[in-house]
Amino acid sequence: MSAEHARFEPGLIAPALLDCARPRRLLVAMSGGLDSSVLLHAVVSLRPILTPCRVRVVHVEHGLHPDAPRWAQSCLEQSAALGVECGVEHVQVRVARGASPEAAAREVRYDVLARALEPDEVLLTAHHADDQLETVLLALMRGAGVAGIAAMPERVAFGRGWHLRPLLPFPRAALERYARGVGIAHCEDPSNLDRRFARNFLRTEIVPRLAERWPAASRTVTRSAALAGEAARLIDELAAIDLATCEQSGRLDVRYLATLSPERARNALRAWIRRAALQVPSRRKLEQIMSDVVHARHDAQPRVTWPGAELRRHGDWLHLMVPLAAAPTTRIPLAVDRAVMLDELGELCLEGCIGAGLSAAALEGRELSLAFRNGGERIRPAGDAHRRSLKKLLQARDIVPWMRSRIPLVYADDRLAAVADLWTESDYAARADERAYRVRWLHHPGLY
């Protein structure tokens, strides 16, 4: 970062804003504090060179502080003085026991901002170099890897558009000097001085000491974060190459993973888990997956769990899923054209059709219900001359063992009529031209 970034003027962020797609549609997230007030002032002053351009403001009021209404009013007044539309979003922040109020408020705030963002619109936030330094330090204290140390990217896809942090190269002192020079009024949040919060402790106790010894600390750490971001993207590209080789229908090939170095295999696992929108486990848990699952015997059926997820192996494949509860033990009434919700096991319904599935005539007057395996079930599949054990049918189809007891069975009175959408009992199978009901089992975990 050049020495000139120790000062701030609107022209220095013009290239980042000019890079936005035309027509430029910018949504400024405003708290009413110094940083976002400077950002709004700078963006508005650049409108003549950004044209065509639309600027609007959104303020999220959390209601966590008695002065919150005053901050919202300040945003409205500043926006009006600059001729910019401003919307105030009122939210409630529920903090789980033991959770961070700051983190809970941030999650709610970004959820609101994502919903407010229009397609291809660019969200602007006022994060600066000192914020980046604090974020990197927090990541280091958590033992984060390269992706964590990369901290906040300058530009990233967000919601239906983009998220841009144009002030990221500038220290807060430079923004303060600019605000004094042009006479920008702003509010101060006294909770920013509450050292019970980790970020505030860093801001008030640690960062000033670092700046005494290394005056350019925030700018140089921001540069390091950008380099870490490059490394993280390269790591992601490597994971994408590995997943393209070993992933099939959401499963991972154990044989390929076993050929990789431990570091590369863990990297592929992390990317696979993130792709499934599940929580990535600790390094120790990933090492357990490698030792207890990937390198297990071929006939073993190991299982590793962590909050919100579980990983299992069957043959040469790894399967990832949310934790599966035991199947219900009681019958569930079933009606035509009305789906039965089965939580993480998906949903099942009977859908009207002609010539496929269950014969409507054969089901006439019978009580329909759903149940799950209890042992000893037998069925003569349509087109098969012999009645067979359901247990052996499932084994022959190579259904994964943990799903064999979780496949919904359709009963007509007390007789097994269908095994989900896998097999239909021959006596209930519809002829080619008759009215029928097709069994549809949707959104269920993988069976193979």
Image (cartoon, grey):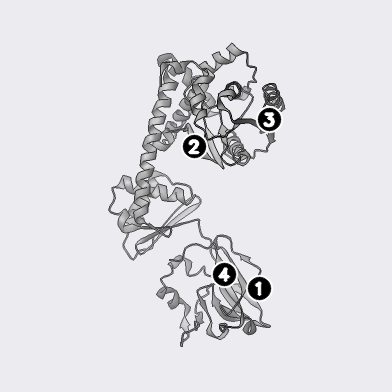
Q: Image height check: is 265 above or below 35? A: below
Which residue is at the far top? 181
Which amino acid type corresponds to the residue marked 4 in the rendered image?
Answer: Arg
Look at discs 3 and 1 and give the one toward the viewer. Answer: 3
Q: Quadrant of residue 49?
A: top right
- The circle drawn on residue 432 is none
Amino acid residing under circle 2 = Val
Identify the mark at residue 440; answer none if there is no mark.
4
- Where, quadrant-wise, is the C terminus in this rendering? bottom left
Is 267 left or right of 135, judged from the image as shown? left
| N-term-proximal mark, 4 vs 1 | 1
The answer to whether residue 210 is visible is: yes
Residue position for label 3:
86
In front: 175, or 202? 175
Q: Secondary structure at mark 3?
A: strand
- How many circles with numbers are drawn on the protein? 4
Instruction: Tell me if residue 202 can be seen.
Output: no
**CB under 8 Å between callouts 1 and 2?**
no
Of the numbered discs 3 and 4, the one sitting upstream in the chain is 3
Task: Determine which residue is flagged by label 2.
Answer: 156
